[in-house]
Amino acid sequence: MVLRVTALSKSYGDVAAVDRISFHVRRNEIVGLLGPNGAGKTTTINMILGVLEPSGGSIEIQGLNLARRRRQALARTNFAAVYSPLPGNLTVYQNLRVFGLIYGISDAARRIEALLEEFDLQRFRNVRCGVLSSGEQTRASLAKAMLNNPDLLLLDEPTASLDPSTAREVRRKIRAVATHGKGGALWTSHNMYEVEDVCHRVLFLSRGRILLEGDPKTLPREHGKENLEELFITVAREPLSLEER
């Protein structure tokens, strides 16, 4: 198992942002973590990244308990999100070089060159990230996320700022990495077409709890909905009607 989350909780006073959720990500699997704003998705990802300390529960990455073996577990993890751009005063190459040192990448220069080519960033190698377009910044962040060939790839709205053609190509690259390597991915998105195209399984969060789980292609029909977007809207507006089914 690439990721195992057990009874994970995060509370702020009397408010439970995440309420004893349990789930897993298998090797070569892409799992979609879905739900409306405020459902607990980003809080969950930040706990898996070690940015937030859980109020309860446990997280294991490739069998390593995050609380007890933080350094080893996080060395096998990487992350990309539109709200977390690379430092804007460094060039694309400098950013990748710095993160290569942080992750202890062997033969980092060769790995960086391969990623610059893979994400069509060669012409931006000496351009500061702060002046790149949002789509170019996203590609640079994804290149950083692939630097250490992570066992667990965490992606929070990774294609939100990309045009449809580039987004499709990025989805293809991520799918190839996740399904043909040694790891898996946890993916959040509000684009239900994207989720259906990419994810093998989805988890719907509502009010900090996992409300639904299943195959994104068949789950809507199981709950009387025509498609994943309809189901998402129902989760956002009428979660109790689904809990009662």
Image: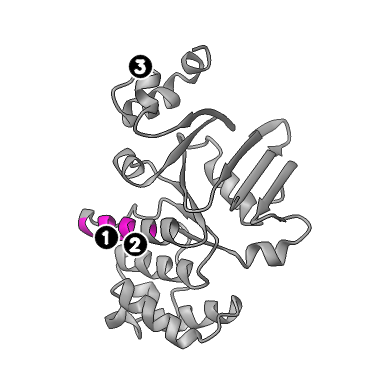
Magenta segment boundaries in residue numbering: 165-174
Q: Which numbered marker is on residue 236?
A: none
Residue closer to the observer: 134 or 230? 230
The residue indicated by pointer 3 is: 224
Q: Would residue 102 appear left or right of 175 to someone viewing this image?
A: right
**Residues marked 1 and 2 touching at CB (< 8 Å):** yes
Q: Check disc 3 and report its element: helix, strand or loop.
A: loop
Q: Position of residue 109 (x, y in %)?
A: 46, 87
Q: Check disc 2 and report its element: helix, strand or loop.
A: helix
Q: Earlier in the sequence, mark 3 or mark 1?
A: 1
Q: Name the amino acid, label 2.
A: Lys
**Quadrant of the rendered image containing residue 92:** bottom left
Residue in the image at 72% along x and 45% along y: 58
Residue 78 visible from this viewpoint: yes
The residue indicated by pointer 2 is: 173
The residue indicated by pointer 1 is: 169
For the residues labelled 3 and 1, the Cα–Cα distance comes to 32 Å
Q: Position of residue 99 (x, y in %)?
A: 53, 76
Mark 1 closeness class: few <14, some 14–19, many ≥20 residues within 10 Å: few
Residue 153 visible from this viewpoint: no
Q: Earlier in the sequence, mark 3 or mark 2?
A: 2
Q: Position of residue 88 (x, y in %)?
A: 43, 74
Q: Name the amino acid, label 3.
A: Gly
Q: Name the amino acid, label 1.
A: Glu
Residue closer to the observer: 82 or 70? 70
The stretch drawn in magenta includes residue 166: yes
